[in-house]
Amino acid sequence: MDILLKQLKNKKQINIAEFMELVVPYYYQNNIAIGADGDFITAPEISQLFGEMIAIWIANHCITKSIYEINLIEMGPGRGTLMYDILHTLHSLSATKDIVKGVYLLESSKKLRKIQAEKLQDFKNINWIDDLAEVSNQNHPNIVIANEFFDCLPIRQFVKTKHGLHEIFIDFESDTPCFALKKTKQKLSLTLEEGEVYEICEDYKLYSDAITSLLKGSNSAGLIIDYGYVDRPIKGTLQALKKHKHHDILSDIGSCDLTALVNFSKLEELFKASAVNTKLHLQGGFLKAYGISERAHLLGSKVGRDFQVDVKRLTDEDQMGNLFKVLEIFA
Ligand code: SAH
């Protein structure tokens, strides 16, 4: 039997967070996750315009604050495409040509670290880290970027039934894994209606604290981009994706991407509680404010391809424009 399934069966019954903790790293290590040949596609893989707009945001921040040296930190860099496009763009602008002094990539998958190293081979001072606390050289402001990182973090799910509050578990004792409910005394910050599911992610605090420490130096800033919500949905948001289609969560365990929508209200609340300033945008509005349409037009006439399809995919309300949010954080 596959090592992962054996490990899960030994656990007998685990909650969704423990399930994600075991499955997500295994998945990234053993599958071609991202890209047309993989299970899902991300904004930087759709178009270079995405990374270019993030670079313009960084350049704008640095010019406004008169910053001449930065560390760039990326959480979950995937295939390295976003960092490549950011570095390429910053190098091409006279104001930011030599601004990046160190790049730090927080990546748990050895397989992806190798792909990132190949993609970024032309750039200097690229470092891989297992923990944000490893970012050295605190003489420069830190710029932290995370695209589709927070959706991978383990969540717990609670549901209210007519018999009270329960946590959702997965039972591996029977032949095929199935969901199971366990009565719980867990205190939630709100009262659920019968049938409502509520999700919490205990790792948000861990990562928001670690990011906050990196932002302490003056003029540091960050962007957290992901699919997520501000108003709590009443259903669970855990989903599995395989070959760009929704898949049953408990079939083909370890070979499907497993994510949950990000609770941006909670993330904002955590940062605000640590005195970090925040601004939340819809991805569509954010990219348009930084000039994605104009850039698509210019690039299109230069290389003879229509980039407006990319713009539509990244910014249209019914595509990625509204579901994806951008949380700006400032020290
Ligand atoms: N940002 C990329 C990839 C998103 S996929 C893009 O936009 O294309 C999620 C990424 O986060 C992968 O690189 C995955 O290996 C990494 N990852 C997931 N959980 C992680 C964790 N706990 N620690 C470090 N990296 C993690």
Image (cartoon, rainbow, N blue to C red):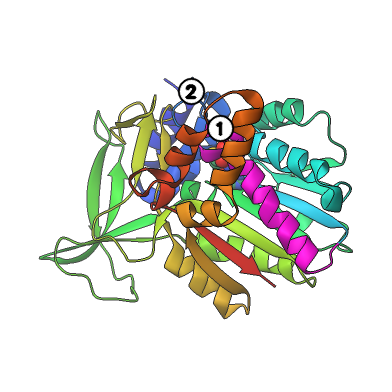
Type of amino acid under label 1:
Glu
Which residue is at the front of the view, 106 or 6?
106
Q: Is mark 1 within 8 Å of ligand 1?
A: yes
Does 254 sit above or below residue 262?
A: above
Relative to 214, is 126 on the left or the right? right
Asked if the residue under mark 1 is in contact with the one under mark 2, i.e. CB atoms within 8 Å, the reply is yes
Q: Main secondary structure of the magenta part?
A: helix
Q: CA distance from mark 2 to mark 1?
A: 9 Å
Q: How many residues crowd around disc 2 within 10 Å: few (fewer than 14), some, or many (20 or more)?
A: some
For residue 164, what is the image quadrant? bottom left
Residue that protrudes farthest toward the left in the picture? 162
Residue 239's place in the image compared with 69, above or below, is above
Dot 1 lies on which element? helix
Label 1 crowd (10 A; few <14 / some 14-19 / many >=20): some
Residue 245 position (above or below residue 168): above
> With 88 as the anchor, is 263 left or right in this view?
left
Mark carried by residue 45? 1
Q: Nearer the viewer, residue 242 or 28?
A: 242
Q: Verify whether residue 6 appears in magenta.
A: no
Assign a secondary structure to mark 2: loop
User: If the image is split into quadrants, where does the N terminus sit?
Assistant: top left
Q: Does residue 265 appear to the left or right of 295 in the view shown?
A: left
Q: Residue furthest front?
A: 301
How many marks the image carries: the answer is 2
Find residue 36 and name its label: 2
Quarter placement of the C terminus = bottom right
Rendering quarter of residue 301: top right
Residue 135 seen by the camera: no
Q: Amino acid at mark 2?
A: Ala
Which stretch appears magenta?
Answer: 42-67
Q: Position of residue 311 (x, y in %)?
A: 49, 40
Q: Which comes sooner in the sequence, label 2 or label 1?
A: 2
